[in-house]
Image (spheres, rainbow, N blue to C red):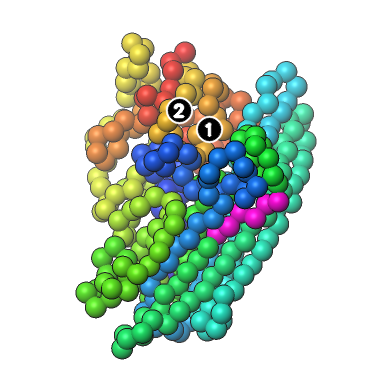
Amino acid sequence: MSDLEAARAVADAVLYDGGRRSPDAAGRPLGLLVPPGFIAAEEPSAAQTECLLDGVEGALHVRPRFLHVRTRTAEGAAPYDEAAERELDLVWPLADLLAGEQRHEERIPGGRENADGVIRAWEPLDVRIRASAERLPGPYGVVRLRLRLENISGWTGEERSEALRRSLVAAHALLGRTGGVFLSLADPPEWARPYAEGCANLRAWPVLVADDLVLSSPIILPDRPRVAAERSGAHPVTLTDRPGEDAPVSPETDRITIAGHEVGRGSKVRLAPGGRADAQDMFVAGRTATVEAVLFDVDGSRHLAVTVDDDPGTDLRRAQGRYWYFGPEDVEPL
């Protein structure tokens, strides 16, 4: 089986970059799974992916991933929400999935930590993963796999901010297979097309990353997406049908004009993500940031790589090249 870690760059691009370009039609964060007791809006608590397997051998490795909202408070500063990455790891023999639905429930406990006067607190989350497989009729030995990711947290209320603290944000999953391969739903073999058309996907779509690796994504993507530029130094992450070539730019010295102000490395901006922002941008709206680089995407789009000024992890993020990415329309020059 392909190393699941090799697909993390694609999954992270969905999580931190792709959502900015492809928001939910209703303007909600992509991959948002609210607690079922949130009664103020009709928003989903579960996502379902169905995909096709060629053959019945081997096992399925499932890695659900999502963001968990935390509230950050410090003396003399207004509280705000940020997010922590969460992921689970499950393995089921395919024979068990064919025998009947397999379920795993996990509680992520609430907590509170105090580090140098900065307090972070988070609410508990209850998550259920359900998986099953069905051998389809015909001579080809095709199996339909169904995966459901569910928020089963018991909170009930009408306050959206409280619901978000108990939600799975930007939820997605990596599916790896040993002993066999997946079939593409976007471009299946002709003999498998009727099977592909019978798959039901709800708020999550299977993207074939490799023959034995699928990304259950809240964004519809082409098969075998690639990261066109590494998320290191001052390069953006971009999803494309094929690897692209960077334009001859200088991220550390290039400058662009925003609202009549020239902005480049070292400039101060206020983050003001608009309606097309991705799932995590809501945690930094209104905060001050420093521009680290001006970036040009493979399609000519412009981006700013920034670090958030009052983030205690800024030095580590800068050393690792893990920046926040915003379009010019999502920042206000200071």
Assess whether residue 110 is covered by the magenta stretch. Answer: no
Above or below: residue 135 compared with residue 190: below
State the residue at coordinates (45%, 28%). Answer: 273
Q: How many marks?
A: 2
Dot 2: element: loop
Check contact, mark 1 vs mark 2: CB within 8 A.
Answer: yes
Percent across and percent down for residue 277 are 44, 34
State the residue at coordinates (42%, 48%). Answer: 14
Please state if 183 lies on the left or on the right of 284 as rendered: left
Mark number, residue 282 = 1
Query: Which residue has dot 2 on it?
Result: 273
Magenta stretch bounds: 149-154
**Which residue is at the far top?**
260
Assess whether residue 153 is covered by the magenta stretch. Answer: yes
Name which quarter of the figure residue 262 lies in: top left
Name which quarter of the figure residue 119 lies in: top right
